[in-house]
Amino acid sequence: MKQYYENVIRTLPSGVSVLLIHTAYENLETQGMMVNHIDWGAAWRQDDYDFFMSKACKKLLKEQNIKLVTWREIQKLMN
């Protein structure tokens, strides 16, 4: 996942992009909710969380001059 997301981030076009991720802890609760979703279950969501909370991700975003914004900030610009 780390390599995948690094590639996605490095190849984003200029402008506004949306990357939707579904982070969660790989715990009993999440495992229970994802019991029938082996390909994108609790472990996958934990991997997403681990990557996007990592120092490596923060460094990559800075190197690529990517600014994180909220939906509220986008809404203000559109008004």
Image (spheres, rainbow, N blue to C red):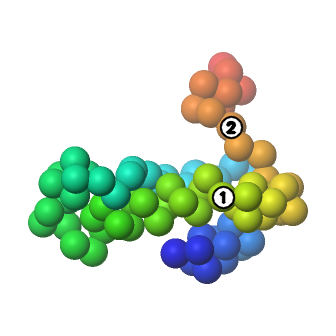
* Element on which disc 1 rests: loop
Camera sees residue 78: no
* Element on which disc 2 rests: loop
Quadrant in the rendering for residue 7:
bottom right
Q: Residue at position x 67%, y 27% from top?
A: 73
Q: Are marks 2 and 1 in contact (CB under 8 Å)?
A: no
Camera sees residue 5: yes
Distance CA(mark 2)–CA(mark 1) = 18 Å
The amino acid on which the numbered mark 2 sits, given as a three-letter code, is Val
The amino acid on which the numbered mark 1 sits, given as a three-letter code, is Ser
Judging depth in this view, the residue of 65 and 43 nearest the camera is 43
Q: Residue at position x 22%, y 58% from top?
A: 31
Judging depth in this view, the residue of 23 and 29 nearest the camera is 29
Which disc is residue 69 wearing?
A: 2
Q: Nearer the viewer, mark 2 or mark 1?
A: 1
Residue 23 horizontal/vertical position (percent): 43, 52
Residue underneath mark 1: 54
For residue 73, above or below residue 56: above
Judging depth in this view, the residue of 27 and 57 nearest the camera is 27
Answer with left or right where residue 2 lies relative to residue 27.
Answer: right
